[in-house]
Image (cartoon, rainbow, N blue to C red):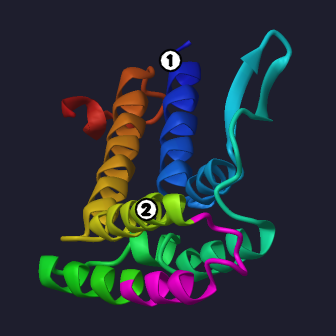
Amino acid sequence: MPQLEYQDSREQGETDVKWLEDSAGILEELEHDFRGEELIETKSGYFWKRTGEPIMNDKGIRSVLSSIRHITNKNTFMSNVTSKRVSDLCFDTQSTITTELFYKYQEFGIAPEYFTKVVIMISNVIELALRRAEGAGDRRAITGMSQNITKQEIRQVSEEPAKKEGLTRFKNF
C-alpha cells in the first residue's frame, strides 16, 4: 500500500498549496464580521448566523472588499517584497481606505463607535496579507512543499521492487 500513502501525501500537499494561494476565505470571514455574523457548527454542518449588529451596510462591505481584494490575492502572496515596501504599501492602502470610510461613513452605515474597529480590522487583513509576501515567504513555503512532494515520490519509487534496472539508482535516497 505505499502507493496509497504517496497519493494521500501528494493530495495533502496540493491542498496546502491551494489554501496558501486562496484569499476567498480571508475576504469571506471579513465580510461576515462586518455583517455581525459568526460561523456556527451544528450536527449537519457549519453555517453563518447573525449574532450581533452589522458594523456596516452592503454598500460599505462591497466597497471595502473591492478595495482590499487586490492586496489579498495570490499575486501578492507569491511576490517578494522588502519590509520597507510592505510598510509603504500598508500605509498607502490603509490611508486610502480610511479616508474613503471617513468621508462615506454615513453612506456606508458605519456607526461612529465602530469606525476605529472597522479600520483596525481592515488594516490587519492588509498588513498580514502583505507580510506573507515579505521575503517571498509564501513562495518559499510552496517551493518547499513541492520539493517535499518530489522527494516523497522519489522515496516511493525506491521502496517499490525494481522492475527495471534504471530504477535502482533511486535506492540511496
The part of the image, by quadrant, that contains residue 94 is bottom left
N-terminal of the two: label 1 or label 2? 1
Where residue 156 sits: x, y (%)?
41, 29
Which residue is rendered at x = 68% and y = 78% of the image? 106
Vertically, is 38 above or below 72? Answer: above
Look at the image and tell me in which quarter the C terminus lies: top left
Q: Residue at x 42, y 38 (%)?
A: 153
Observer-nearest residue: 173 or 163?
Answer: 173
Q: Amino acid at mark 2?
A: Val
> Within 10 angstroms of label 1, few (less than 14), some, or many (20 or more) residues?
few
Q: Secondary structure at mark 1?
A: helix
- What residue is shown with label 1? 2
Q: Does 106 lie within the magenta span?
A: yes
Q: Residue at x 45, y 35 (%)?
A: 164
| Boundaries of the magenta span | 95-111
**Which dot, 1 or 2, sits closer to the camera?**
2
Q: Position of residue 62 (x, y in %)?
A: 73, 74
Q: How many marks?
A: 2
Amino acid at dot 1:
Pro
Let me know if residue 81 appears in the view: no
Residue 88 lies, in percent from the top left, at 23, 87
Residue found at the very far right of the displayed protein: 44
Position above or below: 17 against 46: below
Q: Disc 2 marks which residue?
A: 125
Q: CA distance from mark 1 to mark 2?
A: 41 Å
